[in-house]
Image (cartoon, rainbow, N blue to C red):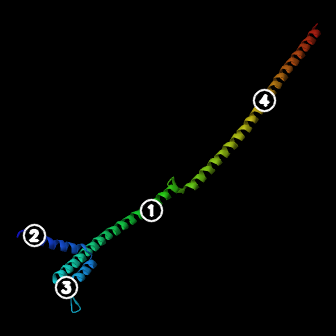
């Protein structure tokens, strides 16, 4: 039993100190005041309890300071992360603006031209070329019709000339026969 008694006292002391540490600082102060004795209007506190309370308060303060330091470090890390992300966002926004501007322009023969201007130029050029093609087609058609009419007139003229030549040839032959007949008549 003698061996168990100091062990039991140690266990009881640890339980009480653990119980004291489990209470909040306010709870420990109230517990200290409640368990202290009164002497001529004063509260008499046992030194061990006061030292224990001071130790607990000091531990709590150290814990709070460590927590504050860790939170400060975490805040610093988060702020640096936010700053880095903000810089990356700005960089991405600039790159996006550059790409959007590149999407709006087109490089033609080394000259940057807005796509709308380029499209307008291409459509007007195509319209102008189509107009020229239509005008050339109309002129060609007119020229073809003139050539066709001229060929028809030429054929008519050739036919008339051929008819005239044949008639002239026939008349000439008739005149020669008459002449020959007359010559033959005069010779007889």
Count residues near mark 4 (Cα–Cα under 10 Å), then give few for <14, some for 14-19, many for 20+: few
Among the 4 quarters of the image, the one containing residue 23: bottom left
Count the labels in the image. Answer: 4
For the point 75% across and 32% down, the residue is 148
Check disc 2 and report its element: helix, strand or loop: helix
* Most distant residue in the top direction: 188
Lower position in the chain sequence, tag 1 or tag 2: 2
Residue 7 — which label?
2
9 with respect to 136 (left or right): left
| Location of mark 3 (residue) | 45
Disc 3 residue crowd, few under 14, some 14–19, many 20+, Cα 10 Å: some
The furthest residue to the bottom:
40
* Cα–Cα gap, marks 2 and 4: 141 Å
Nearer the observer, disc 4 or disc 1? 1
Question: Of tags 4 and 3, which is closer to the observer?
Answer: 3
What is the distance, in whole Å, between disc 4 and disc 1 at their CAs? Answer: 76 Å
Which residue matches tag 4?
152
User: Which residue is found at the position 67% from the left and 46% from the top?
Assistant: 131
Choose the circle earlier in sequence order: 4 or 3. Answer: 3
Mark 4 element type: helix
Looking at the rendered image, the disc whose residue lies closer to the viewer, 1 or 2, is 2
Nearer-N-terminus badge (3/2): 2
């Amino acid at each position: 039993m003698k061996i168990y008694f100091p062990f039991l006292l140690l266990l009881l002391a640890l339980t009480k100190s653990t119980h004291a540490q489990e209470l909040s600082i306010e709870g420990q102060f109230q517990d200290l005041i409640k368990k202290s004795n009164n002497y001529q209007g004063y509260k008499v506190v046992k030194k061990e309890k006061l030292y224990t309370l001071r130790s607990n308060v000091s531990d709590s303060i150290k814990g709070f300071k460590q927590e504050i330091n860790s939170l400060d470090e975490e805040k610093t890390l988060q702020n640096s992360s936010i700053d880095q992300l903000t810089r990356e966002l700005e960089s991405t926004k600039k790159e996006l603006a550059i790409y959007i501007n590149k999407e709006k322009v087109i490089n033609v023969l080394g000259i940057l031209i807005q796509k709308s201007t380029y499209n307008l130029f291409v459509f007007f050029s195509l319209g102008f070329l189509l107009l020229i093609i239509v005008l050339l087609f109309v002129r060609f058609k007119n020229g073809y019709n003139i050539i066709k009419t001229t060929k028809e007139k030429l054929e008519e003229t050739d036919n008339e000339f051929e008819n005239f030549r044949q008639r002239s040839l026939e008349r000439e032959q008739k005149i020669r026969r008459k002449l020959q007949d007359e010559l033959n008549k005069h010779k007889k």
